[in-house]
């Protein structure tokens, strides 16, 4: 029942290539007829020759060679089309999985390792051969050719044909017995391979820390253990498949010997001609192969079904309901959090009943201890995560207020853990606005104070930044990320410690530019630098998921003990205030 469900899931993919599959089945049909033709050829040539006439020998030979040539041709088309259709379907499923994955909710990526996801998309699709290609075709073809052979042989000698069939079902029974074990093992192999990929990926992304902490031996051991797990499940599969194959082959040979012995007996009794026995020997292969090959085909099918199960489950993971496709008109917007609570995994609330309204053009700094929920607040605001309770509202100027999944379409956002693609600087900035011109890219780079260092790079804007931007310094990477955010010219700029890797002067330079060039834009910025925060229109203080204070620097000094303490601590350590006012039109 389950198997049928999984095969039904594959059906639309196969249907798409019905032309290719039709050609394939046509060739296979011809191949079947040619098989009969070969049997007919041996049967009649032998009977003719043994009947004392060699009149048609030349004609027989010409016929035989023609059959072989057509056979070669159909075999070529067959092999090519099997490979082609299988690759096409695998390609479609791979792309479908990738596109599905790209829209998964953030929570999925939090709880699934990227190595595991990678393995599902790349390795599981490769395992589909067993249900798509040669294997599944053989499942259809072998029984049909068996029936055709049986009909042909039964016209020659019915009792012999029935005897030839007797041992076949035994092989089927044995295959069925092994099926579930093989499939379970197939799932185990795929799971272990996924864990191995996960280990490899971890080792690659953590290669520097491995060196620094001299963990080469430990990391290598972990990989070896995971690799051994793969090996053990593969050994187990080899054993089970081997036993199944051996039993199938054994029964198949027994059957052939039986046909030959009984055939000789009938020939000796004059019930069968020698040529007919030849036809039996040739076609007995087609009779018994459906059964003898069943074991092998069955194990391939089960292994492949294990991959189908994983792919099916993957494609049934619910995508995030919040997908932004259309560019929105950029107008000043106010935003509001109404009683928003949020938890990542239903255990602990990371945001607790947050109420917050930010006016268009307002400059808001968010401060608070590490782990107090600042980044989470911004992620929920953007719609990367959805509130478990409460609502996010949007008030675009001159438009109706709406409750939204998030404000992402109106936002230039630089996350705390910024990321660069292994591409040119130009391309990395352009990802912020795909239609951006050269001038716009340069303008954004200037705004992020990145232009001067870009000019010093070997290929300037064409400089390839390496994996995650590894060929740039931390501050340079951060500035490219900022330029990418600025190019979008969105109404709200959201920065999550986006200047943490920069020196104070560079931070000043960048914030000054945002303030001057984006006068009516709102700016929401998480910062640990009180010197920066105290000049904003408003400071929001987070503590243990709660918004505990909100107001200007002066107001908070009056109203919040916690803020006052933070400020006193700041004065005792670093009393240099920034020399620019961070106020916007929201005041
Ligand atoms: N993806 C996640 N899954 C589960 N818990 C998370 C996740 N991200 C953050 N948390 C938890 O949520 C809490 C708040 O994290 P958050 O990143 O919002 O803190 P923060 O105030 O931005 O801290 P920091 O100043 O260190 O960046 C922390 O306890 C953290 O462990
Ligand atoms: Mg944070």
Image (cartoon, grey):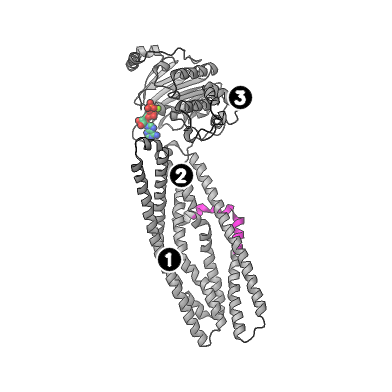
Circle 2 Cα neighbour tier, 10 Å, few/some/many (<14 / 14–19 / ≥20): some
Question: Can see residue 316?
Answer: no
Residue at the farthest bottom position:
269
Q: Which residue is found at the position 37% from the left and 58% from the top?
A: 236
Residue 530 x/y as whole percent: 39, 17
**Quarter of image, res 249:** bottom left
Q: Which residue is found at the position 55% from the left and 74% from the top?
A: 151
Q: From which residue to which does the magenta span run?
A: 7-27
Confirm whether the magenta stretch covers residue 531.
Answer: no
The quadrant in which the N terminus is found is: bottom left
Image height check: is 302 above or below 260? Answer: above
> Which mark sits nearer the N-terminus, 2 or 3?
2
Residue 549 x/y as whole percent: 37, 18
- Kind of element beneath mark 2: helix
Q: Kindly identify which residue carries mark 2.
A: 118
Whether the residue carrying mark 2 lies under 8 Å from ligand 1 is answered with no
Confirm whether the magenta stretch covers residue 8.
Answer: yes
Image height check: is 323 above or below 62? Answer: above
Whether the residue carrying mark 3 lies under 8 Å from ligand 2 is answered with no
Mark 2 to mark 3 CA distance (whole Å): 38 Å
Residue 235 x/y as whole percent: 38, 58
Residue 29 x/y as whole percent: 60, 66
Q: Kindly identify which residue carries mark 3.
A: 439
Horizontal arrangement in the rendering, residue 189 relative to residue 26 (left or right): left
Q: Kindly identify which residue carries mark 1.
A: 245
Dots 2, 1 in contact, CB < 8 A: no
Mark 2 to mark 1 CA distance (whole Å): 33 Å
- Kind of element beneath mark 1: helix
Horizontal arrangement in the rendering, residue 210 relative to residue 453 (left or right): left
Mark 1 vs mark 3: in front: 3
């Amino acid at each position: 029942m389950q198997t049928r469900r999984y095969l039904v899931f594959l059906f639309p993919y196969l249907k798409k290539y019905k032309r290719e599959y039709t050609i394939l089945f046509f060739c296979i049909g011809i191949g079947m007829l040619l098989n009969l033709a070969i049997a007919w050829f041996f049967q009649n040539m032998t009977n003719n020759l043994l009947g004392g006439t060699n009149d048609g020998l030349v004609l027989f030979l010409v016929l035989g060679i023609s059959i072989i040539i057509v056979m070669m041709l159909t075999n070529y088309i067959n092999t090519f089309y099997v490979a082609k259709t299988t690759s096409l379907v695998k390609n479609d499923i791979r792309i479908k999985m990738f596109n599905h994955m790209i829209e998964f909710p953030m929570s999925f990526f939090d709880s699934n390792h990227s190595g595991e996801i990678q393995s599902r998309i790349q390795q599981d699709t490769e395992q589909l051969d067993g249900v798509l290609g040669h294997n599944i075709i053989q499942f259809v073809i072998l029984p049909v050719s068996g029936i055709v052979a049986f009909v042909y042989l039964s016209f020659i000698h019915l009792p012999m044909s029935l005897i030839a069939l007797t041992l076949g079902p035994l092989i089927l029974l044995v295959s069925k017995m092994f099926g579930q074990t093989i499939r379970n093992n197939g799932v185990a192999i795929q799971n272990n391979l996924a864990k191995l990929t996960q280990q490899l990926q971890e080792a690659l992304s953590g290669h520097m820390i491995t060196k620094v902490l001299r963990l080469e031996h430990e990391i290598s051991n972990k990989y070896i253990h995971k690799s051994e797990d793969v090996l053990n499940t593969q050994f187990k599969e080899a054993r089970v498949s081997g036993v199944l194959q051996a039993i199938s082959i054994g029964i198949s040979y027994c059957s052939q010997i039986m046909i030959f012995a009984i055939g000789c007996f009938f020939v000796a009794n004059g019930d069968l001609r020698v040529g007919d026995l030849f036809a039996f020997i040739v076609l007995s292969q087609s009779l018994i192969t459906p059964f003898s090959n069943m074991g092998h085909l069955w194990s391939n099918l089960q292994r492949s079904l294990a991959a189908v199960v994983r792919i099916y489950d993957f494609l049934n993971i619910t995508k995030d309901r919040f997908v932004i496709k259309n560019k929105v008109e950029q107008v000043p917007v106010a935003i509001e959090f109404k009683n928003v609570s949020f938890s990542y995994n239903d255990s602990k609330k990371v945001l607790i009943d947050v109420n917050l309204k930010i006016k268009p053009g307002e400059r808001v700094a968010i401060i608070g201890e590490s782990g107090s929920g600042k980044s989470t607040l911004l992620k929920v605001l953007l719609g990367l995560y959805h509130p478990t309770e409460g609502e996010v509202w949007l008030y675009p100027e001159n438009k109706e207020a709406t409750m939204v999944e998030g404000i992402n379409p109106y936002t230039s956002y630089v996350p705390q853990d910024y990321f660069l693609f292994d591409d040119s600087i130009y391309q990395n900035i352009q990802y912020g606005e795909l239609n951006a011109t050269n001038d716009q890219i340069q303008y954004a780079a200037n705004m992020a104070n990145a232009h001067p260092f870009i000019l010093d790079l070997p290929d300037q804007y064409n400089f390839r930044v390496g994996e995650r931007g590894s060929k740039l310094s931390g501050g340079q990477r951060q500035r490219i990320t900022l330029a990418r955010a600025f190019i979008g010219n969105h109404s709200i700029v959201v920065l999550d410690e986006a200047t943490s890797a920069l020196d104070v002067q560079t931070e000043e330079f960048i914030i000054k530019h945002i303030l001057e060039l984006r006068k009516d834009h709102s700016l929401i910025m998480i910062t640990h630098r009180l010197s920066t925060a105290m000049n904003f229109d408003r400071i929001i203080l987070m503590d243990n998921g709660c918004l505990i204070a909100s107001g200007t620097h002066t107001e908070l000094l009056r109203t919040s003990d916690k803020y006052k303490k933070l400020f006193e601590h700041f004065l005792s350590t670093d009393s240099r205030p920034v020399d620019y006012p961070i106020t916007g039109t929201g005041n």
